[in-house]
Amino acid sequence: LSPASELLDAIETPVAVVDAPTVRANARRVAEYCARHGLAWRPHVKTHKSLGIARIQLEAGARGLTVATPREAEVMAEVTDDVLLAYPPIGRERLQRLMHLPERLSLTVALDSREALRGLAAASREAAREVGVLVEVDLGMGRVGVQTPEELTALAGEVAADGSLDYRGILFYPGHIRARASEQVRSVEEAAVRLDTFLAALDRSGLSPATVSGGSTPTLWTSHHFGGITEIRSGTCIYNDRDMLELGVCDPADCAYTILATVVSTSVRGQAVIDAGSKALAKESLRTVGDGFGWLPDHPDLVVSALSEEHGIIPLKEGGWNPRVGDRVRVVPNHVCVSVNLQDRLVVLDGDTAECWPIEARGRL
Amino acid sequence: LSPASELLDAIETPVAVVDAPTVRANARRVAEYCARHGLAWRPHVKTHKSLGIARIQLEAGARGLTVATPREAEVMAEVTDDVLLAYPPIGRERLQRLMHLPERLSLTVALDSREALRGLAAASREAAREVGVLVEVDLGMGRVGVQTPEELTALAGEVAADGSLDYRGILFYPGHIRARASEQVRSVEEAAVRLDTFLAALDRSGLSPATVSGGSTPTLWTSHHFGGITEIRSGTCIYNDRDMLELGVCDPADCAYTILATVVSTSVRGQAVIDAGSKALAKESLRTVGDGFGWLPDHPDLVVSALSEEHGIIPLKEGGWNPRVGDRVRVVPNHVCVSVNLQDRLVVLDGDTAECWPIEARGRL
């Protein structure tokens, strides 16, 4: 641990900086929400990919962790015995990596196809390892997930009938619901009607699910309006980002993650250029946000308006911030998960102290 | 070296695949163009970040290498004695890393401000290491670079007067010129007029530049229309991408880099979902390309229309490709440099054989 101000002045930029007290407060708030509504919290670690942040989530009461890749599962096995892979493991290599996870680990896999089911069943049989399965259903996003109650009961029935797989229920991701907080209950209740038809079909077929896994950060605080839901996987809420701010899901003080950048040029009048470009912030335009790729919390009327790989352009305002080359500034990225995936380390601030953490589950090797 | 087909069938996706003969042909073509026009080629390695690819460029006749970050310089020092850092090194940490590069390395730095100049001069003096300097000028992009001939001669004069710095000339990046090949000469000649005024001012001040470094891949084949140019740094041309295809700078056969992906879901009628999302392809909308984030060279009428982190959506066409879960497909990303930065390794195909290469200069640590 070094004094925070010294480290922030000296460290090479661009670099990701995380405020630990804010992370702990974010984790506590979700855990309290879940406790109030009888939901389990199984946060998706794709947002942070960090053992240290996962530990904070588990200490706050997370029931286990959600991952997207074999690497995330392998890394997170160090801190949990309960992992959900919310992504179909297609291909022998992915399946083999899953089968080699520590035996103590309870592994559940979400899938939406016979091909995925049969590949997983074969690998599971060969490895003599029981694997839990959630069948993914589509509540309107139109990305993945079975589309009809008939497809659901057929696939769930095949899972339940397989000797090496353990049918544990269903999973959905309401990623299409991006209404602002105030208008969200209606959108959630519309999607919940579709969920009801899936649940009713399962009940009729004797396949009532033990687990109904849902949740996203945009719908975080209205998750309990999905009737029958038992757990949420919301991940972004641990850090938050400009998109979540614009959606009204969090306050500026809840943004735990920023990119610390240095002003590298002021040659063009009326703008400052920082060293955080698309290789640090990620070039993610968001539908909710008019312009730009990041927001400056210390200069709330300024945004990063354009990115090239190693340059971020900040249009300045008359009479406002007028930086010199060498000044440092913090940026909240539009989409935090993809920014994290670009970093090799985190500077974690905890009060007056700071330390560097690796991002252990980054990459795919 | 493994048989290529075996490795491509077995390796976990998404993974970056590079065709070595195409890389060698791309390198040869640029080297021939440069030889024909008396230009040096100092390719920007940000595109590939790989020692193996840099070796191919140097063997084809590259005069040295261009880098953007200290890490790229440190890594590339293994294969070259001549590095241009085309990015101002602001901050003590970056400067210290530069000063610790092997002593045999000829180091040149581009900068556009007094602050950058003074920081570099101080570090160079302290380390007793001569550093070359190119002053960056703006030919119309409006990102970085001095704006007027007066600013240029003042800054170049200060460099020339500094005992620890070696004034070597000027640098520009014509990143604003994105006209198609056929209409490009006119745009280049417009920017060249601005270059002329900079060069004339330097001549009048007794600061005639030994090096005039320019070049981009969109303007690659018209670089010689910049009067006075001595070298080009074009980097993307080693791999090419969907943007370069659309600009008419290359042919489909010149695209050396693809992301190999696996179909993971076909649940939603009319679309296939692959495991290459924004964490493999990068979510880069390009002005030249109508829609989507990647193109399927094996199914030329198809594109990846939408990305989430681990999902790419491919709308299918009636009567065309109708994949099953588990099928594999190649995607040419919109912008190859940012896709490369997301990978941990390359599968390099060379005829019937394949091997995995690290991407040594990825990241910032």
Image (spheres, coloured by chain):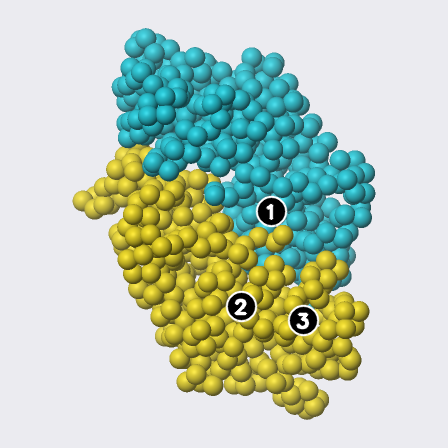
Chain colours: A cyan, B yellow
Q: Quick check: A120 left or right of A252?
A: left
- What residue is pinned by disc 2? B79
Q: Quick check: B238 left or right of B67?
A: left
Q: Nearer the viewer, residue A130 or A274?
A: A130
Which chain does tag 3 point to? B
- The percent coordinates of residue B11 (x first, y second) are 36, 44
Classed neighbour count for the residue bearing mark 1: other residues with Cα under 10 Å, few (<14), some (14–19), many (≥20): some
Q: Quadrant of residue A37?
A: top right
Classed neighbour count for the residue bearing mark 3: other residues with Cα under 10 Å, few (<14), some (14–19), many (≥20): few
Circle 2: residue type: Val
Say above or below: B167 vs A234.
Answer: below
Which chain does tag 2 point to? B
User: For the point 44% across and 55% down, which residue is it?
Assistant: B357
Select label 2 or label 1 by which is in front: 2
Classed neighbour count for the residue bearing mark 2: other residues with Cα under 10 Å, few (<14), some (14–19), many (≥20): some
Q: Quick check: B56 left or right of B8?
A: right
Image marks 2 and 3: residues in contact by CB distance under 8 Å: no
User: For the point 63% across and 52% down, which residue is it?
Assistant: B365
Which chain does tag 1 point to? A
- What residue is pinned by disc 3? B103
- The percent coordinates of residue B141 (x first, y second) are 56, 68
Decide which of tag 2 and tag 3 comes sooner along the chain.
2
- Work out which quarter of the rendered image holds the N terminus of chain B and state it: bottom left
- What residue is pinned by disc 1? A344
Is the same chain shared between marks 3 and 1? no
